[in-house]
Image (cartoon, rainbow, N blue to C red):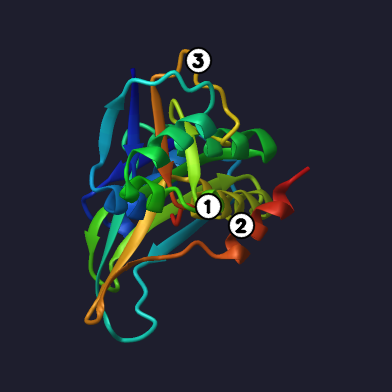
Amino acid sequence: MIEVLYFAWVRERIGLPRERITTDAATVADLVAQLRDREERYAMAFADLGALRVAVDQELTDFDAPLKGVREVAFFPPMTGG
Amino acid sequence: MAVRVQAEPFDLGAEAAAFAATLSAGRRDIGAVVTFTGVVRDDTGTLQAMEIEHYPGMTAPAIQAMVDQATARWSLADALVIHRYGPMQPGEVIMMVATAAGHRGDAFAAAEFLMDYLKSRAPFWKKEITEGGAHWVAAKDADEAALDRWKP
């Protein structure tokens, strides 16, 4: 069971801020592929991975990151702090 | 080395004064205090509000890691980062960075480093609400490119 979080326009496109997902995905990219297959709103949110960033257990990483033992994955657009 | 992530407005002058006062309380070797303040800007005259979303749980530790990097890289006596989230009006203070060092070179460089990383690596997202609707502020290529100059 992985807690999946969405922020900014990713959250708006998918329509929820977080959800618990049971998955056998080995990597973030595998999880994205499974999410895309779920519904159109997921396919739209994950249409362009170049426009997305990912954090695994609250650390920025990339889409190749493994999910073994991971509790939390977050998807969001490039950050605009400061 | 303090990091605060909060919704509430803060008093810029009081924070800067408290930062400098704490430093001078115990030592005499600090010759430079640099502060930077980020303010909600309205480029077009149509901005009604800005909303900043963040990633509770990740935000403060991510900023603390940036402060730790800055401390390892420059000779800093102290550093402070305050960053707000939630709704704000044009002209309101969003965030501040303060750095203190023996000499201004270290204080300026560390403050710029922290600003460049806060822009592109701290999990905040700005949404502008205008008369014409709401939109998420896109990250700028220039902000991402600014990180290159800090690479060893």
Residue B33 point in image, percent of width and height = 53, 52
Q: Chain of mark 3?
A: A
Q: Nearer the viewer, residue B152 or B71?
A: B152
Q: Is residue B59 visible to the viewer in this orientation of the structure?
A: no
Q: Quadrant of residue A3?
A: top left
Q: Is residue A11 left or right of residue B140?
A: left
Secondary element at tag 3: loop
| Neighbour tally class for label 3: few under 14, some 14-19, many 20 plus, Cα within 10 Å | few
| Neighbour tally class for label 2: few under 14, some 14-19, many 20 plus, Cα within 10 Å | some
Q: What amino acid type should be assigned to the residue bearing mark 2?
A: Glu
Q: What amino acid type should be assigned to the residue bearing mark 3?
A: Lys
Q: Are marks 2 and 1 in contact (CB under 8 Å)?
A: yes
Q: Residue at x 58, y 36 (%)?
A: A62
Tell me the residue that label 1 is attached to.
B120
Q: CA distance from mark 3 to mark 2?
A: 30 Å
Q: Nearer the viewer, residue B2 or B142?
A: B142
In the rendered image, which quarter contains the C terminus of chain B? top right
Check the image and report above or below for A34 versus B35.
Answer: above
Q: Residue at x 54, y 39 (%)?
A: B66
Q: Are marks 3 and 2 in contact (CB under 8 Å)?
A: no
Q: Nearer the viewer, residue B17 or A17?
A: A17
